[in-house]
């Protein structure tokens, strides 16, 4: 048991190192980006990026969550290839729709120009392809390439955004740099982790692959996709609603706060998740439960979360003012308001893979619907953005407590699964 435990945390540490470098790049880059771009430009860009992230979830069909259910080798690669094919076909269709929308309607919601509207799709396709390759590497236990893919993506995007900001610090320039960096990273990811087995040689073979995958893993597009889509929409809705209700400047303050809060939290959280989903899956297949590895992971995350709260809450305003400039002090205030949400997200997110292991996507979907309802209620009920964000954070935190409790029950396997069967 001690060998298993040390091996588990050794893999976490390996993924953490790569993730730390990957996340440190945009954090350090933001020190320059915040001084190059005004809050309103950053707000428009963040609204555009939020919509793009919602599209990203749609075009993967959440099949990347199924990669770990296939054994290493050709079977898993066939699933990856099928996911990529479905992603590209869907993306091309959406690109045509976006071009038509830009042509007929011009500027859309959130001060988005026609060019920004069209750029939504290539951005989403690049982000989705990167997500597929990261998930493939994680399920292969390929920590080295997983880290390289993440570092490459963040480095390309950050460097291009800084260079572009010296030329013309606008929302459009930020978006163009984001798209270019994402696609450069995808090409590098393919070079690092290419397909080794035969690709479908005809449209008929490709169609057969798609039919086979959808027949075996239909619960992922049917249940995981709506659940993750609702989750992403709920996460991105604040930036979109804030832009419409309170203006792009407030949205810009919020965007920088979430960027700085989310990045450090995702460093360790993503590292733990990438290792937890492989190790917990192995435990569940062998023993019928994964409660032991769940509890060890939970307590480590709890300690780290408590340390984060103790550090961030007293000093957030001063940190933002010193490092990003006095004009961004309000972002520090917002970061303090959002702390309950981020503290519990840090614990809940890595452990959420338990729902996929026990195939309780329908329960996850119900939770996501509750989350969306809470988000809509808090974002539109109050007249001041201060009150709106505080209640939004508290509501999110309460729902995360429920989520953690459910995932713990499912980690036990056996009788606990019958509760919602």
Image: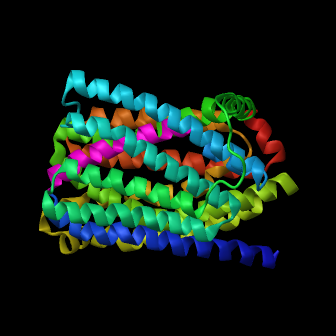
Residue name at image x 48 percent, y 56 percent = 187
* In magenta segment, residue 414: no
Dominant SS of magenta comes to helix
Q: Nearer the viewer, residue 191 or 396?
A: 191
Q: Residue furthest right?
A: 286
Residue at (61% x, 57% y) in the render: 194
* Residue at 67 percent of width and 77 percent of height: 10
Q: Place residue 242 in its image quadrant.
A: top left
- Image side of residue 95 versus residue 142, left or right: left
- Residue 330 drawn above or below residue 200: below
Magenta range is: 38-62
32 vs 125, left or right, is left
Does the image show residue 314? yes
Q: Count of labels shown?
A: 0
Q: Nearer the viewer, residue 419 or 253?
A: 253
The residue at the point 61 percent across, 41 percent down is 83
- Work out whether residue 62 can be spotted: no
Residue 315 is situated, as x and y percent measured from the top left of the image, at 28, 72
List x then y, in percent, for residue 144: 60, 71
Residue with the most extreme front position: 201
């Amino acid at each position: 048991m001690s060998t298993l435990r040390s091996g588990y945390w050794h893999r976490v540490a390996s993924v953490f190192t790569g993730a730390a470098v990957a996340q440190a790049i945009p954090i350090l880059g933001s020190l320059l980006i915040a001084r190059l771009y005004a809050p309103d430009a950053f707000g428009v860009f963040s609204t555009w990026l939020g919509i793009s992230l919602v599209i990203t979830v749609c075009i993967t069909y959440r099949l990347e969550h199924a990669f770990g259910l296939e054994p290493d080798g050709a079977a898993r690669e066939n699933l990856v290839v099928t996911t990529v094919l479905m992603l590209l076909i869907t993306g091309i269709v959406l690109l045509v729709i976006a071009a038509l929308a830009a042509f007929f309607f011009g500027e859309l919601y959130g001060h988005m120009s026609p060019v920004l509207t069209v750029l939504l799709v290539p951005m989403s396709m690049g982000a989705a392809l990167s997500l597929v390759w990261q998930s493939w590497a994680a399920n292969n236990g390929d920590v080295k390439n997983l880290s390289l893919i993440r570092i490459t993506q963040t480095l390309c995007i950050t460097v291009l955004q800084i260079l572009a900001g010296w030329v013309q610090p606008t929302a459009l320039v930020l978006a163009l740099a984001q798209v270019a960096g994402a696609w450069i990273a995808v090409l590098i990811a393919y070079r690092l982790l290419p397909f080794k087995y035969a690709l479908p040689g005809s449209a008929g073979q490709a169609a057969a692959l798609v039919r086979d995958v959808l027949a075996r893993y239909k619960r992922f597009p049917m249940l995981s996709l709506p659940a993750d889509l609702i989750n992403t929409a709920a996460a991105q809705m604040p930036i979109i609603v804030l832009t419409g209700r309170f203006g792009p400047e407030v949205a810009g303050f919020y965007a920088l706060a979430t960027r700085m809060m989310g990045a450090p939290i995702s460093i360790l959280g993503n590292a733990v998740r990438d290792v937890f989903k492989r190790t917990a899956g192995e435990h569940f297949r062998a023993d019928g439960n994964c409660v032991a590895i769940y509890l060890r992971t939970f307590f480590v995350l709890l300690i780290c979360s408590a340390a984060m709260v103790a550090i961030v809450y007293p000093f957030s305003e001063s940190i933002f003012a010193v490092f990003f400039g006095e004009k961004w002090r309000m972002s520090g205030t917002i970061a303090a308001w959002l702390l309950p949400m981020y503290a519990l997200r840090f614990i809940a997110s890595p452990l959420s893979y338990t729902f996929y292991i026990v195939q309780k996507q329908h329960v996850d979907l119900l939770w996501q619907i509750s989350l969306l309802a809470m988000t809509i209620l808090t974002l539109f009920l109050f007249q001041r953005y201060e009150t709106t964000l505080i209640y939004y954070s508290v509501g999110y935190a309460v729902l995360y407590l429920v989520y953690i409790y459910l995932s713990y029950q499912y980690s036990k396997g056996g009788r606990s699964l019958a509760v919602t069967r």
